[in-house]
Amino acid sequence: KNEVEQSPQNLTAQEGEFITINCSYSVGISALHWLQQHPGGGIVSLFMLSSGKKKHGRLIATINIQEKHSSLHITASHPRDSAVYICAVIGVWGAQKLVFGQGTRLTINP
Amino acid sequence: EPEVTQTPSHQVTQMGQEVILRCVPISNHLYFYWYRQILGQKVEFLVSFYNNEISEKSEIFDDQFSVERPDGSNFTLKIRSTKLEDSAMYFCASSGMAGAYEQYFGPGTRLTVT
């Protein structure tokens, strides 16, 4: 059974700070997703990655398959980045279901 | 940009009643999913659906739940006799392929069972 753990659970920072959210998982995966959930509840996919690093605007996601670890970084954070960030993994061999972490609640103060 | 849609956005029902949650996946996608999130908890997988049949389901997805693709566009989740503990946000998702392919989520239906 794959367990997905995120840290920290809550993070409060000042506008402009560099943010890092971590995700660890326990078994082999074919891909890892970073998702964003806003207060209204909707889920938006930010990244899907299987190796290396991806960048989109101020967001950067990295994954280390050997260490079973991924990080999401936000540069020059802004209050509109305030949301819950969720890591979710999908298993190997054509697995379909996503297994979710508990989420990291990020609050960026102006 | 294509998106997954869900209706209704909020459903209130009494315990024991049947509810049907509706989803319209992205049109050329082949894999469809239902997830749920009880308030304050992790998102949990319920069921995946491919080629007009269930391909995987969780232990949560018991005989009270069923899924259907009644036509070429809709994908539904039915709860036959709702319980208080079914109160949650239900998300539909779709993907073009299984495995390491992006899943696109709908906005969710908030189900409140009283």
Image (spheres, coloured by chain):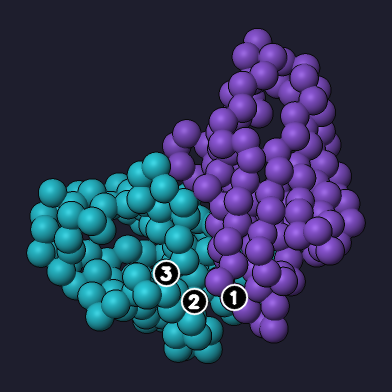
Q: Residue at x 67, y 19 (%)?
A: A13
Residue sitting at x 41%, y 53%: B37
Q: Amino acid at mark 2?
A: Ser
To which chain does the residue with label 3 belong? B
Residue that numbered label 3 is attached to: B46
Find disc 1 in the rendering and name its residue: A96
- Work out how far the residue at label 1 is from the one at label 3, CA to CA, in angstroms: 11 Å
| Residue to which mark 2 is pinned | B48
Q: Position of residue B16 (x, y in %)?
A: 10, 64
Tell which subunit mark 2 falls on: B
Per the image, label 1 sits on a secondary structure element best described as: loop
Q: Position of residue A51 (x, y in %)?
A: 85, 61
Letter of the chain in cyan: B
Q: Position of residue B75 (x, y in %)?
A: 42, 72
Say few, some or many: other residues with alpha carbon within 10 Å of mark 1 (under 14 / 14 to 19 / 20 or more).
many
* Colour in which the image shows chain A: purple
Query: Residue lying farthest right?
Result: A52
Residue B60 falls left or right of residue B48 = left
Q: Is residue B90 above or below residue A40?
A: below
Give the residue drawn at x 45%, y 37%: A40
The image quarter in which residue A56 lies: top right
User: Where's residue B29, x and y in %?
Assistant: 61, 74
Q: Is residue B29 left or right of residue A18?
A: left
